[in-house]
Image (cartoon, grey):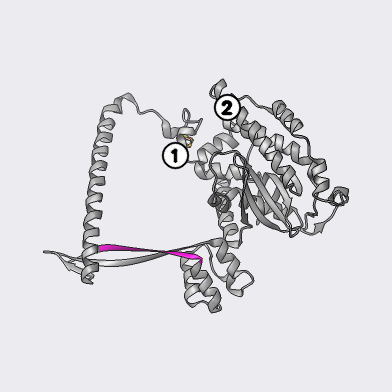
Amino acid sequence: MATAAAPLSYSSVRAYLECPLRWKYLYIDRLSEAPRGYFSFGRTIHSVLEGAIRPLVLPSARRTPTGRAQRTLEDFHPGSVGWPEATRAALPSVESVLAAYQRAWVSEGYNSAEEEARYRLLGAEILQNYWRGLVHDPPQPVAVEEHLEATWDGILVHGYVDRIDRTPTGGLEVVDYKTTRDLSEADARQSDQLTLYQVLVGENFADPVEKLTLYHLRSQTPLRTDARGRGALDELHGRVTSVRDGIRSEEYPPTPGRQCPRCDFRGICPAFKEVPDTERDRLGGLVDRFRELREREQSLNQELAATAEELHKAAEQLGVHRIPGTRIVAIRRREETWRFDGTEVDRILANHPVAGAIDRTDPNAVLRLAKQGDLPAEARQAITAAGSRRTRWYWELER
Ligand code: SF4
């Protein structure tokens, strides 16, 4: 049974944040979900890639439980001499990769034989292209499909990392394969999964994590970002802590949202309980009335926005901020909000004494630092350049 002390994975944290009740169904009641073709497909591809990459792995120094670096005999692999030729020689042939693919195929969850056949072709194409990339530019993996655990500031976390590579500068790169259709650089920059893997690899390996990569298999594109800075790590730790605390206090409220249509537990979820027959007419009438009001609200909001915009244009032309009506005065106000690229701010503040003194997830604190902080002018300018400003005008009414 999952408890507050059981290690939390990325998918477990995400499931709890999305809906604690669904998390309970999955991790405490151990209810199973219906198989889905895209999960089967992902599992098949991952297992074939694991088999293809494992012969290339040259292990790397680990940390001991006390945090010290420790090299083992395995680190001194004869294959580490002569990379990439030695690595190319260790590569399995494309025929053996495709044969492994046929053996590993999982048929579960596809909507039809035709859909399964299309996925099967897609998988074969992905693997052939991936293999070509391996031959052309072989990586230096130090681990593949590695299960890692760590205690992250008091919280047990774990995960399976698809691949960990040696970088050209001697650090480590965490690689997570994605079989999804669409993936962007923003996904890589914002991926909580990569952030958690950085923590796991950082706590278990002696060398520093330098790069985090989502590898888009359909296009063979590595979407690479720098390792996260303090701000992003603290932000995720806060979320993981809230999940740990919720589980500890056994809080599992249903949280209806966009995920519900995909949830297999709607049949038992209290949020989807049927309305009793005796209440159907009365509540049905209320729902219709609510819809009517919503529509009126939308059209009123559009009219309100258009009127405010017309007033704004007039105020700009005339250079005024107060416009009197017959019984009331409209006052124009300006609001400015900032957002900062947390990774860039971390980079600018690295090694600076004020770095630990501010909450870097708070844009106002970062802005104060840029305007009046105890920082060289160059760093203040760089922080301002790492931010984007949004200005909003709005109207208030005064008697
Ligand atoms: S149906 Fe929605 S609210 Fe209910 S358990 Fe599933 S995700 Fe949660």
- In screen coordinates, is 272 left or right of 236? left
Disc on res. 118: 2
Q: Position of residue 57 (x, y in %)?
A: 79, 45
Magenta residues: mostly which secondary structure?
A: strand
- In screen coordinates, is 53 left or right of 349? right
- In screen coordinates, is 295 left or right of 346? left
Q: Position of residue 258 (x, y in %)?
A: 44, 39
Q: Position of residue 13 (x, y in %)?
A: 57, 45
Residue at 58% x, 27% y is 118
Region in magenta? 386-395
Q: Nearer the viewer, residue 72 or 102?
A: 102
Residue at 55% x, 66% y is 345
Residue at 56% x, 79% y is 376
What amino acid type is highlighted by mark number 1? Arg
What amino acid type is highlighted by mark number 2? Arg
Q: Which label lies toward us, 2 or 1? A: 2
Local SS, label 2: helix
Pointer 1 residue:
258
Disc on res. 349: none
Q: Quadrant of the C terminus?
A: bottom left
Res. 117 in view: yes
Decide whether residue 391 is among the magenta residues.
Answer: yes
